[in-house]
Each structure stands twice: as structure tokens, then as C-alpha cells.
Image (tube, rainbow, N blue to C red):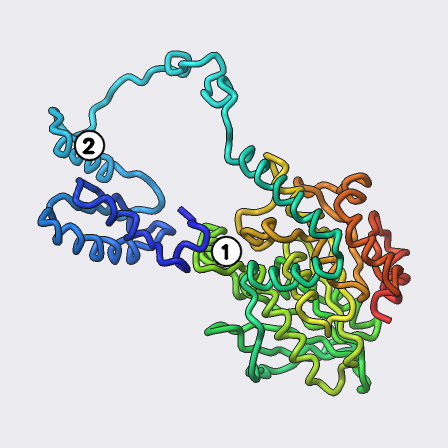
């Protein structure tokens, strides 16, 4: 149902039905589904014109029931009646109580599944084969490092759907409150189109210029902003911390019960939430660059979990991000595709559709060189700690790029970080 760049290429739901005209067609809908009933009604109105053009308007019908995402008795009986009429089948469309066969009687294979019995292909196995071809192409491209990295930067912009911020983004100051040793200021930054990016800015007392850290968490700005939280620790170390709700998290999260709706909507219009979020992060950078209390050569950013790919893209596109930290980041897209079972969310805020045609996350890491990049507790497809061998295999390319440059020490991969190690990492990363 989610056609890759479908709407961007002029294919919508109505088009798929119109090519079926004038044969009999029934749309079965509910009014409170997470799929818009308004969209269904508009589709019906458009397709109805095609059936009218054939002179067979009666062949296109629609039934709707006042229900959520489900298959109601009213809709089921409408389906029975539709097939009885269209295929000239006898009987009543009213449901009757019948005895249901047990599972053993329904099985027609020893395993209970045609796929497992006949060893057929799955979407997972097909994707894995296609991915292997793409990875071989990427590996070949990596042999010409300079040319490859330049292509990655351009392809990542296009495939992620990143749109370069332009003009003066409007920034609205919404007030402040004081805490022990610092102020908390509230802002709203104009987003790419008709949305705003809510942001908290924590500023140490005392005046002067400070390093700045952009703090990006999947649960939004509220995740770690409480007294005694992670953000307060950074502020008390002498940093301004900007915590935004980039599109899709915190206050900007879609209220739909279906988590994939925003990202899949982006895919069919030729975008990805990852690229749009990267644009939001760059807007926060632009805001910080205009502040007299921010050290312009000391702007860094940290992201957690499924927001790490968005920051990785933003850091490639925006050189003003001098240091990047990724905590619990997926090691690569290839690792996810190559595992039939993986633990990344249906929200797809972590993914770029089509990325592996041209690049993977390690290629983006290589593009950041020689700027500082810190990866802590890299994760595999199941969000378990990635094995040493997996880290070595997947991150060898960016490691080799850093090793061949002027600052090989600027790329660090760490795991099992204890509280006693935080100071050394902080001092290295920010200074």
C-alpha cells in the first residue's frame, strides 16, 4: 500500500482502481479507521467518473460502517452480496452460524505453511539478495574514496528528502524560567513548511560565550530535561544545550495510533522523515550560530537510538556541527535488511527508503571526517550490543578514512561506558 515515491510519480489510490474499470468493484471502508474516510470518499468520487465514462456507473459501489480499523458484520455482508450479484451466485448475503474446521483439518501441508513446506522466496529473502548486489556496488565505489564520499553526500540529500533550509527562519521566544545555576528558555522555530519546532534552550548563568550541544532524543525535549537529568549535567559542565522536538517526536509527534503513517506518507511523496528531521536539526544549528553567547567553533550534537540516522545525515550536510555523538545507533542499514527479524520500530523514523542503492550509514560516518565522531554502544538489528566482529566489519570503511586523514583520533567507538568515563569523553568531544 506504500508505493515507493508513488504520489511523487503521479500514482494515487484512485489510479489503481480506475485501471480496473468498468469491471465490478466494491470499496469497503470504516469511518474511524486510521486510513482517512475523507480520502476514501474522495477516491470514490474520482473513480466514479471513470465508471460513468464507460456507462457502467452501477459497477462501482462503496460501503462504510461507523467503526475503527476492522471488518464489521455490515461490511462483511456487503461483500457477500457484492460477489453474489457480480458472479451470479445464489444464496443469502446474511451471515449464518456454521461449524469451523479445526486447524488440523485446514492444513494442506505437513508444516501448516506452503512457504515453509516448499521453501519459497519471501520479501525478506528477496530484499537480502537485492541488498547484496547493492553492497557490492557500494564496496566497489569505496575504492575511490574522494569520489565516493562526494557521491554519498549528494545521493544522501536526494534519497533522504533533505531540503536545504533557506532564508531567515522565524524564531519566536516564548519565555524563560530559572533553575539552580542556569536559565531555561522556550522557543518555537519555523519548520520547513507549516509546522514549528518547539525547543528548550538551557543556558548557564554568568554570561559570556559557551560551547553548544544539540540534544536529540526519540522521546523529545522532555525526555532528559528534568532537574538532575542528563541535560542539566551538560549545562553544569558549562554548555548551552538546545533540546528540540524535531518533526515526529515530542510535541510534533503524530497523534495517530498507527506509528508508520508520517514516515510512509513521506516515502510516497518522495521524502523521508530522516531527511526532514535532518533539516530541522540544521535549523537549530542556524539559530545557535546567530547567538552571541555561543562559541561558533564549538557547536556539537548528540542523538540517541532511532534518531541517530537523522543526526548522522545532518552532520554530513552541515559542517558547522563540529562534533557528533551517536548513542545506541544502528550499526548499518545492511545489518537490518540482512536479518529477517529486527527490532526497529514501524515508525521508520530511522530509515531512508532506497538508501542502499547508493550508501549506508558507515558511508555517512566517513563523510564527517576529519570532524569528531563518537559512537557509543552501537546496536545490531535486534538492538542488542553489536559484536566486536560486526562493528569491525561494518565500520572498517569510516575507520580507514579517518586513519588516512590528518586526525585519525577524531573517530572513537566505545561500549560499556561507566560513569567514571564520562568526564574524559566529554572533555575530548566538546573541547
Mark 2 burial class by Cα count in 10 Å: few <14, some 14-19, many 20+: some
Position of residue 82 relative to residue 152, above or below, is above
Locate residue 67, reporting x and y percent: 30, 46
Locate residue 399, reporting x and y percent: 82, 53
In this rendering, does residue 223 appear at all?
Answer: no
**33 or 229, which lies in front?**
33
- What residue do we see at 46% from left, 17% from top? 112
**78 or 372, which lies in front?**
372
In this rendering, does residue 82 appear at all?
Answer: yes
- Which of labels 1 and 2 is toward the front? 1
Locate residue 374, reporting x and y percent: 80, 58
SS label for mark 1? helix
Q: Quadrant of the C terminus?
A: bottom right
Lateral position of residue 68 relative to residue 370, left or right:
left
Lateral position of residue 337 relative to residue 88, left or right:
right
Mark 1 burial class by Cα count in 10 Å: few <14, some 14-19, many 20+: many
Q: CA distance from mark 1 to mark 2?
A: 35 Å
SS label for mark 2? helix
- What residue do we see at 79% from left, 63% from top? 369
- What residue do we see at 30% from left, 38% from top? 71
Position of residue 300 relative to residue 74, above or below, is below
Disc 2 marks which residue?
Answer: 80
Locate residue 236, reporting x and y percent: 82, 72
Do residues under tags 1 and 2 come within 8 Å of each other at their CB atoms? no
Disc 1 marks which residue?
Answer: 263
* Precedes in sequence: disc 1 or disc 2: 2
Lateral position of residue 363 relative to residue 343, left or right:
right
**15 or 83, which lies in front?**
15
Amino acid at each position: 500500500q506504500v508505493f515507493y515515491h508513488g504520489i511523487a510519480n503521479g500514482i494515487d489510490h484512485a489510479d489503481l482502481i480506475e485501471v480496473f474499470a468498468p469491471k465490478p468493484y466494491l470499496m469497503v471502508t470504516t469511518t474511524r479507521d486510521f486510513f482517512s474516510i475523507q480520502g476514501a470518499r474522495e477516491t470514490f468520487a474520482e473513480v466514479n467518473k471513470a465508471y460513468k465514462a464507460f456507462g457502467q456507473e452501477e459497477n462501482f459501489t462503496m460501503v462504510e460502517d461507523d467503526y475503527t480499523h476492522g471488518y464489521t458484520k455490515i461490511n462483511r455482508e456487503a461483500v457477500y452480496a457484492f460477489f453474489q450479484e457480480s458472479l451470479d451466485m445464489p444464496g443469502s448475503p446474511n451471515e449464518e452460524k456454521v461449524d469451523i474446521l479445526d486447524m488440523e483439518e485446514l492444513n494442506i501441508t505437513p508444516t501448516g505453511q506452503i512457504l515453509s513446506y516448499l521453501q519459497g522466496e519471501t520479501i525478506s529473502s528477496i530484499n537480502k539478495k537485492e541488498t547484496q548486489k547493492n553492497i557490492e556496488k557500494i564496496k566497489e565505489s569505496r575504492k575511490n574514496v574522494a569520489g565516493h564520499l562526494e557521491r554519498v553526500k549528494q545521493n544522501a540529500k536526494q534519497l533522504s528528502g533533505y531540503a536545504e533550509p533557506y532564508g531567515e527562519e522565524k524564531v519566536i521566544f516564548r519565555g524563560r524560567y530559572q533553575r539552580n545555576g542556569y536559565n531555561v528558555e522556550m522557543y518555537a522555530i519555523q519548520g520547513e513548511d507549516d509546522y514549528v519546532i518547539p525547543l528548550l534552550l538551557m543556558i548557564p548563568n554568568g554570561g559570556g560565550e559557551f560551547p553548544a550541544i544539540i540534544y536529540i532524543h526519540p522521546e523529545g525535549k522532555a525526555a532528559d530535561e528534568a532537574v538532575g537529568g542528563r541535560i542539566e549535567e551538560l549545562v553544569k559542565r558549562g554548555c548551552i544545550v538546545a533540546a528540540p522536538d524535531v518533526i515526529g517526536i515530542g510535541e510534533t509527534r503524530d497523534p495517530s495510533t498507527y506509528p508508520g503513517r508520517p514516515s510512509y506518507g513521506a516515502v510516497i511523496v518522495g521524502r523521508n522523515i530522516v531527511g526532514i528531521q535532518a533539516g530541522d536539526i540544521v535549523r537549530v544549528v542556524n539559530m545557535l550560530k546567530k547567538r552571541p553567547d555561543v562559541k561558533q567553533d564549538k557547536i556539537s550534537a548528540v542523538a540517541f537510538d532511532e534518531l541517530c540516522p537523522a543526526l548522522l545525515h545532518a552532520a554530513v550536510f552541515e559542517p558547522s556541527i563540529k562534533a557528533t555523538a551517536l548513542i545506541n545507533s544502528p550499526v548499518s542499514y545492511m545489518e537490518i535488511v540482512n536479518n529477517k527479524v529486527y527490532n526497529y520500530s514501524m515508525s521508520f523514523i530511522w530509515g531512508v527508503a532506497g538508501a542502499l542503492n547508493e550508501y549506508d550509514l558507515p558511508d555517512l560516518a566517513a563523510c564527517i571526517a576529519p570532524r569528531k565522531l563518537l559512537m557509543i554502544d552501537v546496536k545490531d538489528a535486534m538492538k542488542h550490543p553489536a559484536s566486536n566482529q560486526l562493528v569491525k566489519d561494518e565500520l572498517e570503511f569510516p575507520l580507514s578514512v579517518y586513519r588516512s586523514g590528518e586526525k585519525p583520533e577524531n573517530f572513537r567507538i566505545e561500549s560499556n561506558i561507566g560513569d567514571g568515563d564520562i568526564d574524559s569523553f566529554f572533555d575530548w568531544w566538546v573541547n
